[in-house]
Image (cartoon, rainbow, N blue to C red):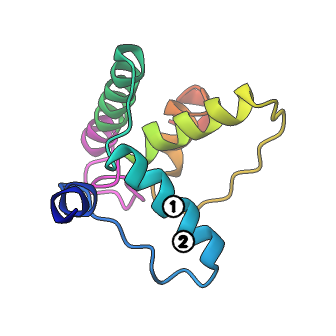
């Protein structure tokens, strides 16, 4: 039992959920993590798409850094995983029939998300 719990909660990705006030939410997360040992089973295509989105986010940040050297900008640097996460979330919601998305976010990484998740052109976001 201890080995299973260590595999689930002590790997390279940590999990904090006990601060959630709603016991149903805590239980839902716990069931999802423990049933997969916190290692979701992704197809080769899904893994490839995640890697592609990470690469796109990283390249966009490099482009911004070189193009706007010394300019104040709200970079996504260090949080590039938000791009494949949002991409997956939006694709999943669309597959379930969602046809409207309202996305609010701080400045940090907003350009990267608009270009690499929402498909806007660089010109459309002012680059």
The circle drawn on residue 56 is none
The circle drawn on residue 29 is 1
Q: Is residue 121 left or right of residue 4?
A: right
In the figure, 69 relative to 125: above or below?
below
Residue at 44 percent across and 37 percent down: it is 84
Q: Position of residue 69 (x, y in %)?
A: 26, 49
Cα distance between the residues tagged 2 and 1: 5 Å
Q: Position of residue 65 (x, y in %)?
A: 27, 45
- Badge 1 local density, few (<14 within 10 Å), some, or many (20+)? some
Q: Is residue 27 left or right of residue 11?
A: right
Residue at 44 percent across and 48 percent down: it is 82
In the figure, 56 relative to 81: above or below?
above
Q: Position of residue 26 (x, y in %)?
A: 54, 71
- 106 in magenta: no
Picture quarter with the N terminus: bottom left
In the figure, 98 relative to 6: above or below?
above
Kindly indicate whether the residue at mark 1 contacts the one at mark 2 (C-beta within 8 angstroms): yes
Q: Is residue 122 left or right of residue 22?
A: left
Q: Nearer the viewer, residue 69 or 87?
A: 87
Residue at 42 percent across and 47 percent down: it is 35
Q: Position of residue 100 (x, y in %)?
A: 83, 39
Question: Which residue is disc 2 drawn over?
Answer: 26
How many marks the image carries: the answer is: 2
């Amino acid at each position: 039992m201890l080995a299973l719990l260590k595999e689930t909660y002590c790997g390279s990705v940590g999990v904090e959920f006990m601060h959630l006030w709603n016991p149903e939410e805590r239980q839902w997360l716990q069931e999802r993590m423990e049933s997969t040992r916190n290692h979701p089973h992704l197809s080769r295509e899904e893994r490839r798409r995640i890697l592609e989105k990470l690469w796109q986010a990283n390249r966009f940040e490099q482009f911004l850094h070189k193009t706007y050297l010394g300019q104040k900008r709200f970079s996504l640097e260090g949080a590039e995983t938000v791009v494949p996460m949002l991409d997956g979330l939006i694709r999943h919601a669309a597959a379930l029939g969602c046809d409207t998305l309202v996305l609010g976010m701080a400045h940090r990484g907003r350009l990267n998300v608009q270009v690499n998740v929402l498909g806007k052109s660089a010109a459309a976001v002012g680059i």
